[in-house]
Amino acid sequence: MKRLLFLIQIIFICLTLTSLAQVPRPDHVVVLILENHAYDQIIGSKAAPYINSLLKDKHCALFTNYYAIMHPSQPNYLAIFAGSNFGIDNDDLPKILPFTFANLGAELLSHHLTFIGFSENLPSAGFNGVVSGNYARKHNPWVNWQGAKKNNISAKLNLSFNSFPKNFTKLPTVSFVIPNVKNDMHDGKDPDRIEQSDLWIKKNLKSYIDWSKKHNSLFILTFDEDNDLGDNHIPTIFLGQMVKGGSYKEKVNHYSLLKTIEAMYHLPYINESKNSRLIEGCWVTNKNIMRK
């Protein structure tokens, strides 16, 4: 029996290492999260010309079968950042703070890597209020861990988008970009809010997106949820030097996204990411790019 258990453990380790070997290790990952639109509202839409232009790039992967976890916004942000909604099913300020659960930012820090969350219109570093102008706390998951004795995310890592570096080599290992509610397709009406967000991305992130294709870096665009009229099918793209362009139909979700970032940096799989599908079919096989 002991020998059998030992063999099972060896097989599990080998399978895990084989899976991890299929995922690259980018120098930088930037995750952009937009709001409340379904796949068919964005992909092919004339209101989003810049986003759709990215789909033609040889370094861009479109996931045609990607789904959010639930409704409304806040649980989905938590799912991406920490692999669970922790029982939160609304956009209200969580009743018990700070959180001490495992999360992506704390994982990175504990492995001598770096993390920063950039939120547009955040009034000051570490701001912990619910709303400030067009900034909404419910779209900023890492703030829930500020001041925690375990899995803490320092206020110094909760920054305004104004702090997003122009020298991209100074970006952390993983960062999240959260536009304000006017620029993330949350407020307003279609097609105007789609057009405004599309222009915002082009103005503010095009330079990084172009740079990522030559500097072993990755840009991820996803949405928190759909428009609450469908089955939570949302647009998600990966773009970067290590990406093999095309459309990918494997069914994946926010937990898969978290798991894939964890795999890139040999981090433990936390919460629901443990049971989710790894995104591994969209990577080039260049040995200088793939993780060794």
Image: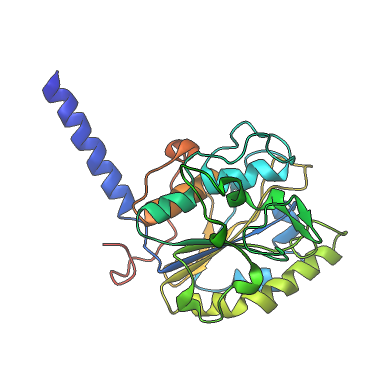
Q: Which residue is drawn at 41% across and 62% down?
A: 283
| Whether residue 67 is visible | no
Q: Say which of 116 and 69 sits in front.
A: 116
Q: Where is residue 212 in the image (x, y as percent from the top left)?
A: 49, 75
Relative to residue 90, is residue 105 depicted above or below?
below
Q: Foreground residue, 177 or 124?
A: 124
Residue 107 relative to residue 167: left or right: left
Please provide percent x and percent y for residue 74: 68, 44
Would residue 63 be found to the left or right of residue 180 on screen?
A: left
Tell me the quarter of the image containing the C terminus: bottom left
Left or right placement of residue 191 versus residue 19 in this view:
right
In percent of the image, x 72 and y 60: which residue is there?
42
For image coordinates 64% across by 44% down, the residue present is: 76
For the residue pair 153 and 91, the one nearer the viewer reads as 153
Q: With 110 as the anchor, is 101 left or right in this view? A: right
Residue, far right: 189
Observer able to see residue 122: yes
Residue 122 lies, with reference to residue 234, above or below; the image says below
Give the quadrant of residue 275.
Answer: top left
Measuring from the top left, give residue 45's x and y in whole percent: 76, 64
The residue furthest top is 1
Residue 207: quadrant of the picture: bottom right
Q: Indicate the quadrant where residue 134 lies.
A: bottom right
